[in-house]
C-alpha cells in the first residue's frame, strides 16, 4: 500500500523551526526573566523568612527561659538579702540593748559614786561644822569661864586689854 | 462530592474518546476507510484549524517564493474551503489541499486569485482552472499518479513546501517556504500567551503577598511543581552552585512541553501534534545544546577533547566519540519527545479508526454498517480510554524527561570536577 499522505511530523519544516525558535526564545526570555526568576526568588525569600522566624522564635523561647532563670536567681538573692538584713537588724538591736544596758549601768554606778562623794563631802562639812560649833561653844564657855575668873582681877583685865590692843594694831 | 468527581472523570474520559472519534470522522474517505492515511493526515500540521463538521478557524498564511523572492500573505479563509479542508481558490499558485498549503508546480499557472477545482489527495493532486474545461480526471491518475505531462493544458500538478531533510525523508526543496502561522504555530502562541498569563499572575501574587503562603489558584496548583523542578531536578542535577541560573530555562522547557503535550490530547480543538513535530523538538534540543556548550567549563571540554587519566591511544578513540556525544545527547532528546508524542497520537487515532474499519467489515460481511460500527465503537472506546490514560501519563513523563536530561547535560557542563576528586 502506498501512502498518499507523507509522514509530516518527521520533516524538519523551516517555517515551524523558525516560529518555534521565536516563540520558545521569547517564552524563555520573558517568562523566565519576569516570572520564573521572581517566583524562584520569592520562594527562596519566603523560605528564608520562615527559617528566620522559626529561629528567632526559638531564640525568644530560650531568652524567655533564661530570663526566668535570671528572675529566679534575682528573687533568691533578694530573699537572701532580706534574711541577711533581718539578721543584721537583730544583731544591731541586741547590741544596742546591751550597749544601753552597759551605759546605764555605768551611769548608775557613776551617779552612785558621785553621790557617795557628795555624801562624804557633806558628812565632812557637817563634821567640820559640828567641830566649829563645838569649838565656838567651847570658846564661848571658856570665855564665860574666863570672864568670870577675870572679873575682879584687874591684873588680868589689864593684860587682856594689852592683848586686845595688840590685835587692834595688827 | 465523590459522585461529582466520578462524573467529572467519566465526562473527561468520554470527551477524550469522542474528541478523537470526531477527528477521525473528518478523515473518512469516500469508499474504504484507510486507518494509516487518516492517522498520518491528523498528526500533520495544517494551515487551517479544523474543529468539527465544516467549522474551521482560518489562520494567517505567510508564503515565500524562493525563486522570485515574493511574499504572499493572506488568511487561509481566502481559499474558500468547501469541504474537507480543500479550497476552491488558488492564490499566487498556492492551493489548500486537505488543510495544507501546496503550490501548483507549473509556472504557466496564472498568479493572483483563481477559481480552481482540486482533485486527488496527497501527492496525486491535479488542479484545474474552473470554467476552463471541467473534465473528470479520475481516469488520469488511475494509470499514472505522477503525471507531469504538460500536454493536458489546463491540468496542473502540485508540490509541497520546502523541507530541510535533504530529500531523505520524502521532503526536499521546492519553489517556496511556508512561514505561515500554522495550527502548530498557533498552538505554541496560545501556549506562550496562556503560560505567560499564568506565570506572570503567579509572580504578581508572590509580590503582593510577600513572604506568605500561596493565595491564588495558580499558586496553589503550580507552586509544588515549581518547587519540585527546583529541588528535585535543578538542585541535585545541576548542583548547588549553579542551579538558580538555569532554573528559568528548565522550568520554561518543562511547562512549555507539558502544555503542548496536554493540549494535543484535549478533544474538540483539533488535537494539534506540536510536541510530536520534529521541527519543534529540534529547536528545543538545539536550545539545550547551545546552553550546555556555551556554559561548558574547562573541565568539561578537557573531558571531551582530551580525556585525562587514559592512555594516549585510547584518547584518540575517545575524543571523536565524545565530540559525537555532544550532539547525540540533544539528538536523543528530540527523537524521544517527537517519537513518544507522535506514536501516542497515531495509536489513539488508530483505535478510533477501528470504528470505521469495523463498519467496512460490517458492510462486507453483510452484517450492516451500523452493527459493525457498534462493535468497532466498543473496541475503540475501551482501547482509546486505556491509551488516553497512558498518553496523559506520557505527557507528564516526557516533559519531565526532557527537563531532567537537559538539566543533567547542563550540570555535566558546568561541573568543575572539584566534587569528584
Image (cartoon, coloured by chain):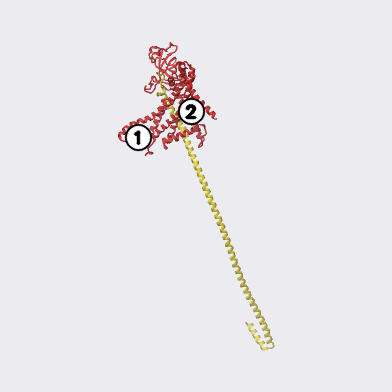
Chain colours: A yellow, B red
In this orientation, does residue B220 appear? yes
Q: Quadrant of the N terminus of chain B?
A: top right
> Foreground mark, 1 or 2?
1
Q: Residue furthest left?
A: B313
The location of residue B131, given as percent across then percent down, is: 45, 11
> Which numbered marker is on residue B143?
none
Residue placed most toward the observer, B391 or A91: B391
In front here: A15 or B13? B13
Q: Is residue B109 left or right of residue B53?
A: left
The residue located at (40%, 27%) in the rendering is B335
| Residue A13 at x, y percent in the picture | 40, 23
Residue B304 relative to residue A94: left or right? left
| Chain to which mark 1 belongs | B
What residue would you read off at disc 2?
Answer: B194
Quarter of the view holding residue A105:
bottom right
| Residue B214 picture location, percent across and down | 51, 34
Return the chain for callout 2: B
Residue A145: horizontal and vertical position, in percent? Answer: 68, 85
Mark 2 crowdedness (10 Å alpha carbons): few <14, some 14-19, many ≥20: few
Please name the residue that numbered disc 1 is placed on.
B303
Mark 1 vs mark 2: which is more N-terminal?
A: 2
Dot 2: element: helix
Mark 1 secondary-structure assignment:
helix
Q: Is residue B394 left or right of residue A130?
A: left
Determine if residue B81 is in view.
Answer: no
Q: Are marks 1 and 2 on the same chain?
A: yes
Amino acid at each position: 500500500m502506498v501512502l498518499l499522505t507523507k509522514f509530516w511530523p518527521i520533516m524538519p519544516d523551516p517555517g515551524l523551526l523558525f516560529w518555534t525558535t521565536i516563540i520558545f526564545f521569547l517564552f524563555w526570555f520573558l517568562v523566565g526573566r519576569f516570572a520564573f526568576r521572581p517566583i524562584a526568588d520569592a520562594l527562596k525569600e519566603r523560605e528564608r523568612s520562615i527559617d528566620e522566624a522559626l529561629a528567632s522564635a526559638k531564640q525568644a523561647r530560650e531568652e524567655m527561659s533564661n530570663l526566668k532563670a535570671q528572675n529566679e536567681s534575682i528573687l533568691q538573692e533578694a530573699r537572701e538579702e532580706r534574711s541577711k538584713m533581718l539578721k543584721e537588724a537583730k544583731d544591731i538591736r541586741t547590741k544596742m540593748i546591751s550597749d544601753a544596758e552597759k551605759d546605764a549601768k555605768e551611769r548608775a554606778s557613776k551617779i552612785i559614786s558621785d553621790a557617795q562623794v557628795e555624801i562624804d563631802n557633806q558628812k565632812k562639812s557637817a563634821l567640820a561644822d559640828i567641830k566649829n560649833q563645838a569649838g565656838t561653844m567651847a570658846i564661848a564657855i571658856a570665855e564665860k569661864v574666863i570672864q568670870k575668873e577675870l572679873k575682879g582681877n584687874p591684873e588680868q583685865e589689864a593684860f587682856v586689854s594689852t592683848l586686845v590692843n595688840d590685835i587692834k594694831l595688827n | 462530592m465523590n459522585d461529582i468527581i466520578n462524573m467529572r472523570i467519566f465526562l473527561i474520559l468520554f470527551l477524550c474518546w469522542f474528541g478523537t472519534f470526531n477527528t477521525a470522522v473528518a478523515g473518512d474517505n469516500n469508499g474504504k476507510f484507510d486507518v494509516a492515511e487518516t492517522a498520518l493526515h491528523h498528526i500533520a500540521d495544517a494551515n487551517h484549524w479544523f474543529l468539527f463538521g465544516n467549522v474551521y478557524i482560518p489562520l494567517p498564511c505567510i508564503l515565500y517564493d524562493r525563486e522570485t523572492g515574493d511574499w504572499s500573505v493572506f488568511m487561509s479563509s481566502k481559499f474558500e474551503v468547501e469541504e474537507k479542508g480543500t479550497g476552491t481558490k488558488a492564490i499566487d499558485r498556492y492551493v489548500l489541499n486537505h488543510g495544507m498549503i501546496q503550490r501548483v508546480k507549473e509556472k504557466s499557472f496564472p498568479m493572483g486569485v483563481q477559481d480552481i477545482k482540486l482533485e486527488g489527495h496527497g501527492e496525486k493532486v491535479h488542479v484545474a482552472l474552473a470554467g476552463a474545461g471541467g473534465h473528470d480526471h479520475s481516469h488520469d491518475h488511475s494509470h499514472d499518479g505522477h503525471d507531469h505531462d504538460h500536454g493536458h493544458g489546463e491540468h496542473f500538478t502540485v508540490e509541497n513546501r520546502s523541507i530541510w531533510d535533504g530529500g531523505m525523508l520524502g521532503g526536499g526543496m521546492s519553489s517556496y517556504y511556508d512561514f505561515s502561522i500554522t495550527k502548530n504555530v498557533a498552538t505554541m502562541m496560545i501556549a506562550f500567551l496562556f503560560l505567560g498569563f499564568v506565570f506572570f499572575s503567579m509572580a504578581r501574587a508572590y509580590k503582593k503577598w510577600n513572604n506568605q503562603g500561596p493565595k491564588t489558584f495558580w499558586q496553589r496548583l503550580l507552586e509544588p511543581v515549581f518547587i519540585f523542578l527546583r529541588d528535585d531536578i535543578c538542585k541535585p542535577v545541576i548542583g548547588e552552585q549553579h542551579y538558580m541560573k538555569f532554573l528559568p530555562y528548565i522550568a520554561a522547557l518543562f511547562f512549555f512541553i507539558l502544555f503542548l503535550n496536554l493540549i494535543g490530547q484535549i478533544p474538540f480543538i483539533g488535537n494539534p501534534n506540536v510536541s510530536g513535530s520534529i521541527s519543534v523538538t529540534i529547536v528545543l534540543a538545539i536550545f539545550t545544546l547551545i546552553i550546555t556548550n556555551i556554559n561548558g567549563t574547562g573541565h568539561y571540554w578537557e573531558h571531551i577533547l582530551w580525556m585525562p587519566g587514559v592512555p594516549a591511544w585510547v584518547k584518540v578513540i575517545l575524543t571523536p566519540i565524545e565530540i559525537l556525544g555532544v550532539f547525540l545527547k540533544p539528538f536523543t532528546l528530540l527523537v524521544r519527545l517527537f517519537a513518544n508524542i507522535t506514536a501516542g497520537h497515531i495509536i489513539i487515532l488508530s483505535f478510533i479508526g477501528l470504528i470505521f474499519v469495523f463498519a467496512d467489515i460490517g458492510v462486507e460481511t453483510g452484517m450492516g454498517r451500523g452493527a459493525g460500527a457498534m462493535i468497532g465503537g466498543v473496541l475503540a472506546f475501551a482501547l482509546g480510554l486505556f491509551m488516553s490514560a497512558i498518553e496523559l501519563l506520557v505527557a507528564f513523563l516526557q516533559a519531565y524527561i526532557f527537563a531532567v536530561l537537559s538539566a543533567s547535560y547542563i550540570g555535566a557542563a558546568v561541573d568543575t570536577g572539584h566534587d569528584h576528586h
